[in-house]
Image (tube, rainbow, N blue to C red):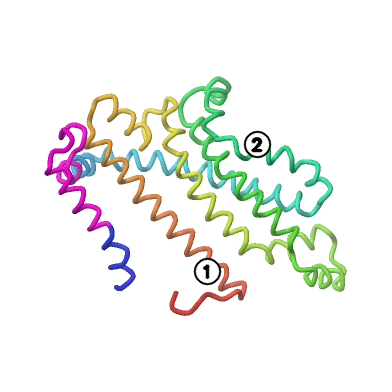
């Protein structure tokens, strides 16, 4: 209950400030809708079922891009970390590509793959791929040599060592990379859905902007924030569970 109050109380303060500013009429109501107006717009879309469809479309694109990025980044990261010379050769290229915003590739993605779901999925893939890849490579490079000695004592092959010794040993670090990638990918979801999709929360924002429906626009932004918070809580729980399972321990009372 204490954690719940700690989580909710700041939002109560924020909504109260928002309501006061809206009542002062500092900005026109059409440009700065009140919490009541946004709540009505949100409730209306919930009743019509339109919001559920938009959330479903966004979550489908997000999980498809995020899961494919996670699997490929972990596999490639394990291989590159296991072969340091190969990683030394490819690292400059990765460091060159990593800072480029996924949105910068959007014109090419649309030209190559057309409009619809694919651009959004590719944007999410790019946003999630590099944090997981770099976390995995770093974890493999920094693995305790005790694990490798144990593997040698049991006569395991390199493939067995990588999959049965190294991967379980570094999995908590990988989950940390997955946690970072969730936030990064979720941020770029809206940008990806602005590339010609006809559904989803990103499309809802564009459509509300074009029709000057600022109450609907703010409602969509709030939903994006709530879903992002839920995803963060879920991945944080998975991170803590992985630490508990692998015996790293969690601070009592956390």
Taken as a whole, is the magenta stretch helix, strand or loop? helix
Q: What residue sits right under mark 1 in the picture?
A: 241
Check contact, mark 2 vs mark 1: CB within 8 A: no
Which disc, if any, is residue 51? none
- Marks 2/1: CA–CA distance: 32 Å
Q: Residue at x 22, y 52 (%)?
A: 15
Pointer 2: what residue? 97
Which numbered mark, 2 or 1, is in the foreground of this view? Answer: 2
Q: Position of residue 12 (x, y in %)?
A: 23, 58
Find residue 94 and report its horizontal and vertical position in percent. 69, 40
SS under mark 2: helix
Q: Is residue 225 above or below residue 97?
A: below
Q: Is residue 18 magenta?
A: yes
Residue 253 screen position, x and y as percent: 43, 78
Magenta range is 11-40
Which of marks 1 and 2 precedes in the sequence?
Answer: 2
């Amino acid at each position: 209950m204490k954690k719940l109050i700690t989580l909710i109380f700041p939002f109560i303060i924020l909504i109260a400030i928002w309501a006061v500013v809206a009542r002062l009429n500092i900005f026109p109501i059409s440009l700065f809708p009140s919490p009541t107006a946004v709540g009505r717009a949100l409730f209306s879309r919930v009743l019509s079922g339109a919001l559920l469809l938009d959330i479903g479309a966004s979550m489908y694109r997000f999980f498809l891009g995020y899961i494919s990025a996670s699997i490929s980044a972990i596999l490639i990261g394990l291989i590159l970390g296991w072969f340091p010379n190969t990683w030394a050769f490819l690292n400059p290229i990765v460091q060159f590509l990593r800072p480029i915003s996924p949105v910068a590739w959007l014109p090419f993605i649309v030209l190559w793959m057309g409009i619809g779901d694919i651009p959004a999925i590719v944007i999410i893939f790019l946003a999630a791929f590099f944090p997981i890849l770099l976390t995995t490579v770093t974890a493999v490079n920094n693995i305790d040599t005790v694990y490798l000695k144990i593997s040698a004592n049991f006569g395991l092959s390199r493939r067995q060592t990588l999959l049965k010794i190294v991967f379980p040993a570094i999995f908590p670090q990988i989950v940390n990379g997955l946690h970072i990638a969730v936030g990064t990918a979720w941020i770029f979801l809206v940008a990806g859905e602005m590339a010609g999709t006809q559904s989803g929360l990103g499309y809802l924002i564009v459509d509300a902007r074009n029709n000057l429906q600022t109450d609907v626009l703010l409602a969509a932004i709030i939903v994006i924030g709530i879903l992002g918070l839920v995803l963060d809580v879920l991945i944080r729980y998975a991170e803590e569970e992985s630490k508990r399972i692998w015996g790293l321990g969690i601070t009592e009372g956390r």
